[in-house]
Image: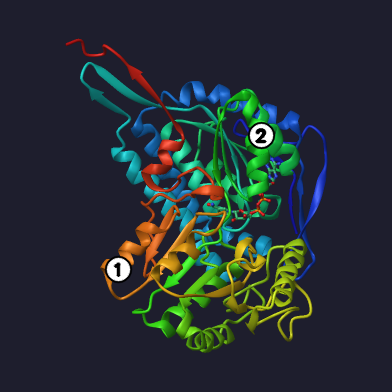
């Protein structure tokens, strides 16, 4: 049982102003795994005050001083990697292989990237007589989701700290265990008091209090579109910067010259990673109309090979995060059946042999049309839809016919053609035959948000730009 009832404020573990707790549930067993405290607006205020006080000195530190702190964090992070992975498995059900591998590895990657970027980042430039200075924006409120819990926290905290900002973090209630260990890591690394602060609690209470707080200069939010809109509305009267990283319904266009069977199989397996709970998952697979039957055969075979079960064993897929998520995903599967899509793998209910836990069958629908609800809404579970296209223009039209614009993929043998298609997709990151890069910007078009994180682009989110005119008189 984990009991995390304290907040991290001004370099100390402190009790909430009001003692309120909530039980956490292990999604693999449906049993109580511990409890966390629920903060209020008063706790947020204390954390913001600590962050404001620390900003006065942290914002004035040198690049070298901040590099030293980040390097100390790396040492402590690596010491606790196993604990962080175990916490992720327990809180949101990621299989241990994924938790120890990619989930924890993303944190290491963002930290190593922040260190490298900071070494050479240009905080100043001269243009004629003017000097343009990039300064830390101030106190940043960071609000994060549960799905890649350590990734979401580290992709914000490291660039914020690297640029000289101070932060107040509110991680998701569903993924507080890993956030707690991260706070312990920062404490052990000797991050100066007040530079990193953490409050637990509900989005509607703690997140809302951060969003409207007059002394928070910026909110960096990752999560769902409705919460992103609520935060922007709450933040508007204080005119703070709001960076939003929201949902997606991304397309994987498999071009006619690609190896269809291989790419369909890869697309199915990729969709099921993290039990389909990935914002950038390519949840709409687009295949040439004449080859739908071939795609169905390959998808069926691939889905049958996805193992589901106890995340502490060697499986590809654990449970979804919560009962609510299970109910929501089941609702979408039912909707797909009702809409007349062809269910070719998975379907309603738990996988055979699993009577407890929020397990969902790896599910694939074929012959889906882009107007169906299962093609338009973010399901955030292991559900892939396959849509047929007539020609390349039609494929691009379908790919772009969505409210979202987070990611995408183009599979094709002719690189020039694949490049041309990638250029026409309205999304923040598009892979050609897949791809991954810690230094590339990550963020969305349209309702997928307005922010850009990762690499040096992530630094810009936390910086103000000041022009000092006449700095070098001519
Ligand atoms: P969510 O929006 O329910 O919650 C995210 C965070 O916001 C949580 O900490 C929550 O407590 C807080 N929150 C909720 N309502 C709030 C409010 N009114 N004011 C302030 N804070 C509030 O999302 P989730 O279920 O945790 O995560 C899943 C969603 O996140 C999906 O839509 C997914 O696509 C998205 N996501 C996006 C990215 C990206 O980089 N674009 C990455 C991961 C997840």
Residue 216 at x, y percent in the picture = 59, 27
Q: Comparing marks 1 and 2, which lies closer to the viewer?
A: 1
Q: Is residue 15 visible?
A: yes
Residue shown at 49% from the left, 50% from the top: 444
Residue carrying label 2:
233
Q: Quadrant of residue 37?
A: top right
Is residue 255 or residue 143 the one in the foreground? Answer: 255
Residue carrying label 1:
417
Residue 43 at x, y percent in the picture = 72, 31
Residue shown at 75% from the left, 38% from the top: 205
Q: Are marks 1 and 2 in contact (CB under 8 Å)?
A: no
Is residue 140 or residue 249 the one in the foreground? Answer: 249
Residue shown at 43% from the left, 44% from the top: 72
Asked if residue 227 is positioned above or below residue 402 in the image, the reply reads above
Asked if residue 221 is positioned above or below residue 396 in the image, the reply reads above
Q: Which mark identifies residue 261?
A: none
Q: Residues within 10 Å of mark 2 (few under 14, many from 20)?
A: some
Q: Residues within 10 Å of mark 1 (few under 14, many from 20)?
A: some
């Amino acid at each position: 049982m984990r009991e995390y009832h304290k907040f991290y404020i001004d370099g100390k573990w402190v009790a909430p102003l009001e003692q309120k707790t909530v039980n956490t549930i292990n999604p693999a067993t449906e049993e109580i795994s511990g409890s966390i405290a629920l903060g209020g607006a008063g706790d947020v205020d204390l954390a913001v005050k600590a962050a404001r006080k620390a900003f006065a000195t942290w914002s004035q530190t040198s690049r070298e001083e901040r590099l030293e702190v980040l390097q100390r964090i790396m040492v402590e992070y690596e010491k606790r990697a196993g604990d962080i992975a175990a916490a992720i498995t327990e809180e949101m059900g990621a299989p241990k292989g994924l938790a120890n591998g990619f989930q924890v590895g993303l944190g290491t990657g963002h930290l190593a990237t922040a260190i490298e970027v900071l070494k050479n980042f240009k905080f100043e430039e001269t243009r004629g007589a003017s000097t343009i200075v990039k300064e830390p924006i101030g106190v940043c409120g960071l609000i994060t989701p549960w799905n890649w819990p350590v990734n979401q926290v580290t992709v914000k905290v490291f660039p914020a700290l690297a640029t000289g900002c101070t932060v107040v973090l509110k991680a998701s209630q569903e993924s507080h265990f890993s956030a707690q260990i991260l706070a312990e890591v920062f404490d052990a690394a000797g991050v100066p008091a007040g530079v990193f602060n953490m409050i637990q609690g509900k989005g509607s209470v703690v997140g809302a209090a951060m969003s409207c707080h007059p002394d928070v200069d910026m909110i960096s939010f990752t999560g769902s579109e409705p919460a992103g809109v609520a935060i922007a509305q709450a933040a508007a009267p204080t005119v703070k910067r709001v960076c939003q990283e929201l949902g997606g319904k991304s397309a994987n266009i498999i071009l006619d010259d690609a190896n269809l069977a291989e790419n369909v199989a890869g697309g199915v397996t990729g969709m099921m990673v993290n039990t389909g709970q990935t914002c950038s998952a390519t949840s709409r697979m687009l295949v040439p109309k004449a080859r739908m039957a071939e795609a169905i055969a390959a998808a069926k075979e691939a889905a049958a090979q996805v193992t589901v079960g106890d995340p502490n064993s060697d499986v590809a897929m654990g449970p979804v995060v919560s009962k609510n998520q299970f109910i929501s995903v089941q609702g979408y599967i039912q909707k797909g059946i009702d809409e007349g899509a062809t269910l070719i793998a998975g379907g309603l209910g738990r996988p055979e042999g699993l009577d407890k836990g929020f397990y969902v069958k790896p599910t694939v629908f074929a012959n889906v049309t882009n107007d169906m609800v299962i093609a338009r809404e973010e399901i955030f579970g292991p559900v892939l839809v396959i849509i047929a296209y007539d020609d390349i223009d039609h494929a691009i039209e379908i790919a772009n016919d969505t409210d979202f614009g987070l990611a995408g993929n183009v599979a094709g043998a002719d690189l020039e053609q694949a490049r041309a298609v990638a250029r026409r997709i309205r999304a923040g990151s598009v892979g050609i035959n897949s791809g991954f890069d810690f230094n590339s910007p990550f963020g969305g078009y349209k309702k997928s948000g307005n922010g850009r994180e990762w690499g040096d682009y992530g630094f810009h989110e936390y910086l103000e730009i000041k022009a000092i005119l006449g700095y070098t008189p001519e």
